[in-house]
């Protein structure tokens, strides 16, 4: 499951000190500052509203250092759609007030108390149940789950109306609560793992103290689990996790069963029979029942899934886009936040950061691609969540192919079990084309001019044929100190098939500080105008250029070819 990283959002430099005090309480949280106004924060944003809404939609807890009204107005359009919401708090810039706004069931009041303690002020708690009883009954601590929310709300309003309550079962966190307890009360808070619907007068809270081990190759996993729970008279809500065999790691059926139950999947190498295996994985002796290839353990206390077996490792090969944060796809941002290890060429790892102290950065030289790919699999096969970083798109002259090649060459089953995903990014040719207009608006060809990994003769052949076919051309790796003459030769070949007035676009450091965009012609282009941070686009015979109002030019290649359609 993705750990949720809290976002501390600030608008001005004056709030940074308060933000840092809050960050000391939540070391994983990142400070997001308005670009141009705040320096020394962890992330920069350009638009407050869009940023806040995006964080909210990603379920990130939000601590906004600004007026409560601003936060409310910004999130208002999203409020009606959302069932479960993350905690959202407004904190006064000088730290003098902490106002929980949204996310009562996500623990916003708990956060408000924690932040208020850190800032040495009183939190502005307004939830009546919480004020009266000192705890939110509908938000039990981790390790416990609430039965039915709607029934729970009615239950709390009965309590607020003055009714007494009994507690049945162990609820250590309620010891400090100021509940009107009475052994004869009609209302009961019941804490146990038994199956069955709650009675009308009950608030049911389930300890997550049940683990089911699913033997290797078990068919019909979901049905078998449901039957086993029913036979043992245990509630599904009490499941802490599923334990499966290492050899079943990649089985989609298991993933589906776990996500339908809303529990993590953990893995261990089976030893002995299924009951023995489960006991070993739990590392404690608990009551275990075996039913066919399934075993169920019920512990006295909630169980922490993190301490049972290990997770399926994950390897994501991601594209950062050209550089600007707005051009990074949200799935990539989320992947970077969940990573335990980040691998890549140092420049790109730095571009992807900053990272939390618990995230390990493995920076390597740009040329060690296969070695980096193998290292990524070694880490992921240990159950870690690994990210391999590329600029632009990872599938365009970057790490995705190297990672797949390493996997293809490997016969290690642990590598093949890794949860591998490639997440796309905006490639340099697309980012450059967009800034110039639409030079790639018709058929085009993408080539790397580097002859490090392919013979120069094949580059010449492809250039010749692509230019002859009248494709627009996008050149990556156009030139470098080690490859000084190749671009000149490439342009000579293209010039055999294109007129000197063919439009050319040069995008340098697009989406990065100091970016430049130049529109010129094939006749005027010389290799000294290009370096290794440049993307070159050569138009086709139909590519057009016209002046734009702001100065400079628009470049586009029309959708049609031949005679202009009417
Ligand atoms: N995977 C990357 C390409 C890596 S190859 C992508 O999809 O964009 C490296 C080449 O990409 C560089 O030599 C340069 O030609 C081009 N490039 C990468 N980032 C760029 C940027 N921000 N601006 C212009 N060109 C860029």
Image (cartoon, helix red, strand yellow):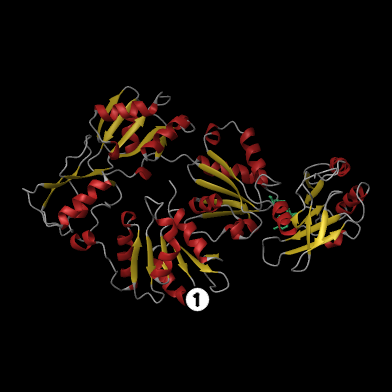
Position of residue 290 measured from the top left corner of the image (x, y, whole percent): 29, 26
- Image coordinates of residue 265 in percent, x first then y, are 40, 38
Left or right placement of residue 197 versus residue 87 in this view = left
- Tell me if I can see residue 25 in this picture: no
Q: Please identify the residue farthest to the right as the structure is shown.
A: 496
In the image, 461: left or right of 475?
right
Q: Residue at x 58, y 57 (%)?
A: 352
Is disc 1 placed on a helix, strand or loop? helix
Q: Does residue 544 appear in this view?
A: yes
Task: Determine which residue is flagged by label 1.
Answer: 13
Between 2 and 380, the one lying in front of the other is 2
Quadrant assignment for the C terminus: top right
Between 268 and 315, the residue placed more toward the observer is 315
Residue that protrudes farthest toward the left in the picture: 184
Q: Residues within 10 Å of mark 1 (few under 14, many from 20)?
A: some
Residue beneath the point at 88% across and 54% down: 502
* Ligand 1 picture quarter: bottom right
> Which residue, as the protein is rendered here, is positioned at the far front?
566
Residue lying at 62% horizontally and 60% vertically, measured from the top left: 324
Q: Position of residue 205 (x, y in %)?
A: 23, 45
Instruction: Find residue 27 and report its image quarter.
Output: bottom left
Indicate the quadrant where residue 111 lies. Answer: bottom left
- Is the CB of mark 1 within 8 Å of ligand 1? no
Residue 68 location (% of width, % of height)? 38, 69
Pick the residue in front: 544 or 391. Answer: 544
Total marks placed = 1
């Amino acid at each position: 499951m993705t750990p949720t990283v809290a976002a501390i959002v600030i608008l001005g430099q004056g709030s940074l000190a308060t933000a840092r005090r809050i960050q000391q309480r939540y070391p994983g949280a990142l400070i997001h500052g308005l670009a141009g106004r705040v320096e020394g924060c962890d992330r920069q944003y350009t638009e407050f509203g869009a940023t806040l809404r995006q964080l909210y939609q990603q379920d990130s807890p939000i601590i906004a250092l600004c007026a409560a009204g601003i936060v409310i107005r910004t999130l208002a359009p999203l409020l009606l759609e959302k069932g479960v919401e993350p905690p959202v708090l407004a904190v006064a810039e000088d730290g003098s007030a902490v106002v929980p706004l949204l996310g009562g069931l996500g623990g916003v009041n708990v956060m408000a108390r924690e932040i208020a303690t850190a800032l040495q002020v009183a939190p502005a708690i307004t939830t009546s149940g919480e004020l009266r009883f000192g705890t939110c009954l509908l938000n039990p601590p981790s390790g416990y789950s609430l039965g039915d929310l709607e029934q729970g709300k009615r239950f709390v309003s009965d309590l607020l109306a003055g009714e007494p309550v009994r507690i049945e079962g162990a609820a250590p966190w309620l010891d400090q609560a100021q509940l009107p307890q009475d052994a004869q009360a009609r209302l009961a808070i019941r804490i146990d793992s038994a199956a069955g619907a709650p009675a009308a007068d009950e608030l049911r809270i389930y300890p997550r103290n049940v683990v089911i081990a699913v033997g290797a190759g078990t068919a019909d996993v979901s049905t078998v689990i449901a039957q086993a729970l029913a036979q043992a008279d245990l509630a599904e809500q009490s499941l802490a996790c599923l334990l499966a065999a290492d050899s079943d790691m990649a089985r989609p059926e298991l993933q589906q069963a776990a996500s339908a139950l809303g529990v993590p999947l953990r893995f261990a190498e089976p030893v002995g029979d299924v009951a023995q295996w489960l006991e070993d994985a739990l590392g404690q002796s608990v009551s275990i029942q075996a039913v066919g290839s399934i075993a169920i353990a019920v512990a006295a206390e909630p169980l922490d899934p993190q301490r049972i077996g290990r997770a399926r490792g994950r390897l994501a090969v991601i594209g950062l886009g050209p550089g600007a944060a707005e051009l990074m796809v949200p799935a990539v941002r989320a992947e970077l936040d969940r990573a335990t290890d980040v691998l890549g060429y140092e420049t790109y790892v730095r571009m992807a950061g900053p990272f939390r102290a618990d995230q390990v950065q493995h920076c390597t030289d740009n040329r060690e691609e296969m070695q980096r790919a193998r290292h990524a699999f070694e880490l992921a096969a240990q159950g870690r969540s690994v990210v391999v970083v590329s600029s632009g798109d990872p599938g365009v002259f970057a790490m995705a192919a190297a990672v797949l090649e390493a996997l293809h060459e490997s016969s290690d089953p642990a590598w093949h079990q890794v949860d591998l995903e490639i997440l796309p990014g905006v490639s340099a040719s697309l980012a450059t084309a967009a800034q110039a207009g639409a030079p790639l608006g018709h058929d085009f060809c993408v080539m790397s001019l580097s002859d490090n990994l392919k013979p120069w003769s094949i580059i010449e052949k492809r250039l010749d044929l692509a230019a002859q076919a009248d494709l627009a051309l996008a050149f990556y790796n156009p030139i470098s100190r080690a490859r000084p003459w190749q671009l000149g030769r490439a342009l000579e070949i293209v010039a055999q098939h294109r007129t000197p007035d063919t439009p050319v676009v040069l995008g340098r450091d697009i989406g990065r500080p100091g970016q430049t965009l130049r529109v010129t012609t094939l006749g005027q282009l010389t290799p000294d105008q290009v370096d290794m941070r440049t993307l070159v686009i050569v138009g086709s015979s139909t590519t057009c250029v016209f002046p734009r109002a702001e100065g400079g030019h628009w470049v586009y290649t029309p959708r049609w070819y031949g005679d202009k359609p009417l």
